[in-house]
Image: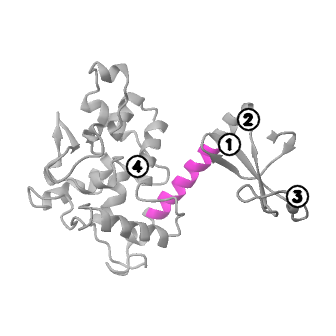
Amino acid sequence: MRTNGVGYSCMLQRDGGTYYFRKAIPSALRPFFPSKKDGSKGQRELLVSLRTKDKEVAKSRLHRAALEADAKQLRTLFASPLYTGAESKARRTKPGSYVEPDALWWLFPMTLYSGMRIEEAMGLRVEDMREVDGVLAFVVESRPDRTLKTLSSARTVPVHTALIRLGLVEWRDKQPRGGLLFPELRPDKRHGKLTAALSKTAGRYLRALKMPASVTTHSTRHAFADGLRRAKVEPEIRSPLLGHSTQTMTELYGAGHDVQALEEAVNAVRYEGVGQ
């Protein structure tokens, strides 16, 4: 691909809605390029905006590279000691034979296969995982002890078959009725969030795996949204599953989708190289 008459084979970058090529500037020429931020000399790279006709190709390459990176990160995560065996509960980044399904263990598959926000997923009660019209589902709703982010956050998300195979039903059935699905969690004193400490622990685990800083506990929600798009699930189904308001005429006139359609969409989500 060529831009402004010059060939660039260097890294693509996105800044908002604009696509760029990032091109290294030879050291001999750096004094002639002022820094974009402070006007000083010695800029090492040049960002060149793409022509309009190149943007779709650039966007496609960026998206493909992002999906490949996501797949690699997921494989790294699920091949890590948390899932394959750690030294101990306190040393879960070190290989060993210790495996314990607990809140940290369930956090990543729960959010990856449901698209729920971390506080929504880990704040579920035992009764929130139940059959709805014959379909096993998570029922996300407000409670006196928990408010949701938006009105559209209240929703029904069918349980992905991958979570069933991982033993989530058996996990639920072992927990006391009326309590949390993950009873080890406690609200923090500052904001009352159940997942404050868990989120920090998960973040430290991801950093120990050398994941980039951009990979967080929220990344699995984005991965699920990408999975729905890859499966060509229509927006009118994607949005309710993710707790977004579609603001379409379909929604306004109440012609929604039944839970069987939602179940089909959820189970269409697949991740390359990750056991389903």
Residue type, numbered disc 3: Phe
Give the mark nearer the N terminus: 2 vs 4.
Answer: 2
Residue 182, how many percent across, how many down?
A: 21, 61
Residue type, numbered disc 1: Tyr
Residue type, numbered disc 4: Arg
Give the mark nearer the N terminus: 1 vs 4.
Answer: 1
* Range drawn in magenta: 62-77
Q: Is residue 104 above or below residue 133?
A: below
State the SS at label 4.
helix
Per the image, is 69 magenta? yes
Q: Residue at x 48, y 69 (%)?
A: 207
Q: Residues within 10 Å of mark 3 (few under 14, many from 20)?
A: few
Gap between marks 3 and 4 measured at Cα:
44 Å
Which is more toward the observer, 135 or 26? 26
Is the Cβ of the residue at disc 3 closer than 8 Å to that at disc 2? no
Give the mark nearer the N terminus: 3 vs 2.
Answer: 3
Q: Residue at x 52, y 53 (%)?
A: 70
**Residue corresponding to mark 1:** 19
Gap between marks 1 and 2 measured at Cα:
9 Å
Residue type, numbered disc 2: Asp
Identify the mark at residue 221; answer none if there is no mark. 4
Position of 228 with respect to 8 (left or right) is left
**Residue corresponding to mark 2:** 54
Q: Is residue 131 above or below residue 275?
A: above
Q: Residue at x 33, y 60 (%)?
A: 107
Residue 219, how many percent across, how many down?
A: 45, 54
Gap between marks 3 and 2 measured at Cα:
28 Å
Give the mark nearer the N terminus: 3 vs 4.
Answer: 3
One can see residue 146 in this view: yes
State the SS at label 2.
helix
**Residue corresponding to mark 3:** 32
